[in-house]
Amino acid sequence: MKNLLIGLIVVLIGGAGFLAKDLYSTVHERKQKMEDYAEVNMVNYELFNMQLWKEKALNIIDAEIKAFNFTEETYVALDDQIKSYVNAMYKIYFEQGELSKVIIAEVKNNSDINPFIVKMVESQVPDLIKSLNLKPQIPVLSKQIVSEIRANEPLIKEYLQKELLRLVLDEDTAEYIDRRELVYAKYNQPNLAATDTFLKAEVAQLDTSINQKILWLCLVFLGIIIAAIVISKVAGTSYMVGALTIASVILLILGVSMPMIDIDARLNSFAFNLFGEPITFDEQIIYYQSKSIVEVTKTLWLGGSWDLKLVGALVLLFSIVFPFFKLLLSGLYVVTDKIKTSKFAKGVIFHLGKWSMADVFVVAIFMAYIGFYGIISTQLNGISRNDGGFAVETVNYSRLAPGAFFFTAYTILSICISIVISRLDGSSVKNP
């Protein structure tokens, strides 16, 4: 019976290790694809891309110009405006003598003209201009101008389109380089829409696979715990502690190497009306981060400033080094008499082990999640409740990632191991 249980535990631990490695690969594959999805859908490529705004506005204005037509009422109003303008000019230049003044000034300024001619022009031109009866010709002139405008309406539209295009394009002399094309090429996709469709399908498939693997892993760990309890009745507590310690090591490795929290804030849609036509932007990522304890530690250590390095070192010490060291001593405690009599080992397991603060770290993870979720939700709701005349729909996909659950499971199992060892040793764990 003992050997059978030992064999079962060995098989279950081996299965847990295999499933853990497979789950780790799947989770990190999903993380990579989500980071690529976030990269190609970042808000700076869409809503904050001025070039794209110009293109969308240009398309709308260009369509408005093409669809624009002068109505008969417009031509009538235009005819009235031209007649009004020409009448005003006629009054100034003909009736009030501004034209004769201009002609006389030009003649006087020309030194080649005989003074006699100058005097004659000065005396005769004002009366001659006033005698011209051109006012009845103004309606005819106005209708000719309107007729020319009507005939050249397509040319006017073309001119407006060319000028609009010139105004938009002349401001951007540098060639626009879209870095998203690297991601398109990575997945052999031709454009953004195809890449989005591909990555969404891949992430959905990976999510299903991750949930299935987590379920199987939980069942395997449950089997290890049950087998460990049974073997403790048959062969002693030391076998149970050994099995649970190995299971804890696997949980700890998963907990510190897999993402703890996915922070995912998005603009689900954005719409703005220009000339009655909507300018719309589909789903965009405002912020996305998914990091494990190991990655956070590395980021803090490489942060540059001494305070970040100090925090990174503390996270590494209290959340990775101490827990592994304590589990190692806990496993050896029940199988080696030298460790049982070691004050150092007892101090680490029963006293110093408390300073790993794994349980406190779990609480911090959940509090950080609640805090981030609340802040992001509040900010997104503030964006949605805008008074600017545009429509915004926001969504918060932040969630606890698998690493948080496995680290929590490790913490609970580690506490249970400490209780079992304490009872086995005949002493109780004291607060430091």
Image (cartoon, rainbow, N blue to C red):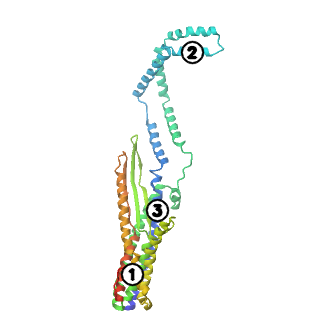
Give the percent coordinates (x, y) of residue 119. Answer: 60, 8
Instruction: Tell me if mark 3 has few (under 14), some (14-19) or many (20+) residues whose alpha carbon lies within 10 angstroms of its own.
Output: some
Give the position of the C terminus as an image quadrant.
bottom left
For the residues labelled 1 and 2, say whether their Cβ atoms are less than 8 Å apart. no
Spatial CA distance of label 2 from label 3 is 77 Å
Residue 215: in sight, yes or no? no
* Residue occupying the point 49% across, 55% down: 191
Q: Secondary structure at mark 1?
A: helix
The residue that mark 1 highlights is 351
**In the foreground, 373 or 425:** 425
Along the horizontal axis of the image, is 267 left or right of 50?
left
**Which residue is most to the front?**
432
* Residue occupying the point 44% across, 91% down: 338
Return the disc, 1 or 2, that comes first in the chain's sequence.
2
The residue that mark 2 highlights is 103
Give the percent coordinates (x, y) of residue 147. Answer: 47, 24
**In the foreground, 37 or 141:** 37
* Residue occupying the point 43% across, 24% down: 81
The numbered mark at residue 265 is none
Q: Amino acid at mark 2?
A: Ile
Q: Amino acid at mark 3?
A: Glu
The residue that mark 3 highlights is 35
Seen in the picture, residue 62 relative to 96 is either above or below; the reply is below
Query: Between tags 1 and 3, which lies in front?
Result: 1
Q: Amino acid at mark 1?
A: His
